[in-house]
Amino acid sequence: MQPTIDFYYTPLSPWSFLGLEKLLIIAQRHGEMVRFRPVELPRVFATTGYQPIAQRPPALLANRMQELRRWREFLGVEFNLEPKYFPVPDKLACLT
């Protein structure tokens, strides 16, 4: 059986998007298979007490955007940091 990396992610997260290519490169280099494990982030937030993005204080939102810009530039990846509709429902995307 081929060694496997379980990748727990949410389709809503720009962080999942930013890390995916690097993860796939690492997995290929080591002969590992990646098994995608989608999670419904709102359910995780509800059980951990973490605030959904819309409910976070402005300072945390500003920090999040600054970090996303930095990582986007560092990785050389283009994507829209402020999509017209966000967040979007993730239930269909999380179905396996």
Image (cartoon, helix red, strand yellow):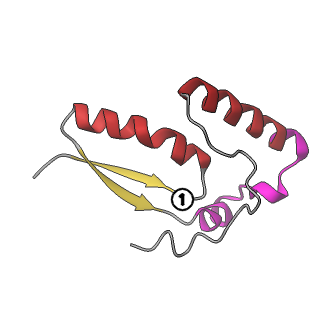
Residue 57 falls within the magenta-colored stretch: yes
Read off the residue under disc 1: 11
Front-most of 91 and 43? 91
Q: Position of residue 96 (x, y in %)?
A: 38, 72
Above or below, 72 against 15 in this view is above
| Amino acid beneath label 1 | Pro
Above or below, 54 against 64 in this view is below
Q: Quadrant of residue 88?
A: bottom right
Q: Is residue 18 left or right of residue 23?
A: right
Name which residue lies at 74% across and 63% down.
85
Residue 17 falls within the magenta-colored stretch: no
Q: Tell me the SS state at disc 1.
A: loop
Segment colored magenta: 41-60
Q: Quadrant of residue 76?
A: top right
Q: How many numbered tags mark residues here?
A: 1
Name which residue lies at 88% across and 39% down.
59
Q: Position of residue 74 (x, y in %)?
A: 59, 24
Above or below, 94 against 6 in this view is below
